Amino acid sequence: MPSTSIRKTEYDPETRILSVWFVASGKRYDYEAVPSETYEAFRCAFVKGRFFNEHIRDRFRHRMIAEA
């Protein structure tokens, strides 16, 4: 998953939570109620940052997760 802005993603289909780790800040955010179709499209997108900005950011409830 090469991206200049997104380091890593994980998706839990049971809870529909998408976790995104960002390169610049190193922070992780969890996005709630993300449909599996949206995650699959995100995973397959050629430009991950653009897809994230257009289809995920500001469209789903989210929270920053404090890393242990």
Image (cartoon, rainbow, N blue to C red):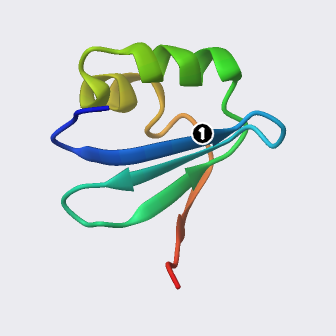
Q: Is residue 19 left or right of residue 3?
A: right
Q: With respect to residue 66, does 23 lie above or below? A: above
Q: With respect to residue 52, does 36 lie above or below? A: above
Residue behind mark 1: 60
Q: In the rendering, at what x and y percent does residue 37 appear?
A: 64, 14
Q: Residues within 10 Å of mark 1 (few under 14, many from 20)?
A: some
Q: In the rendering, at what x and y percent does residue 49 appear?
A: 27, 32
Residue type, mark 1 in image: Phe
Q: Is residue 15 left or right of residue 50?
A: right
Instruction: Point out the residue furthest to the front here.
Output: 1
Q: In the rendering, at what x and y percent does residue 34 appear?
A: 66, 32
Q: In this view of the protein, which residue sits in the foreground, 40 or 57?
A: 40
Q: In the rendering, at what x and y percent does residue 7 appear?
A: 30, 49
Residue name at image x 68 percent, y 22 percent: 36
Residue name at image x 48 percent, y 32 percent: 56
Mark 1: secondary structure: loop
Residue name at image x 54 percent, y 34 percent: 59
Q: With respect to residue 15, does 43 lie above or below? A: above
Q: Is residue 49 left or right of residue 11?
A: left
Residue 6 lies in quadrant: top left
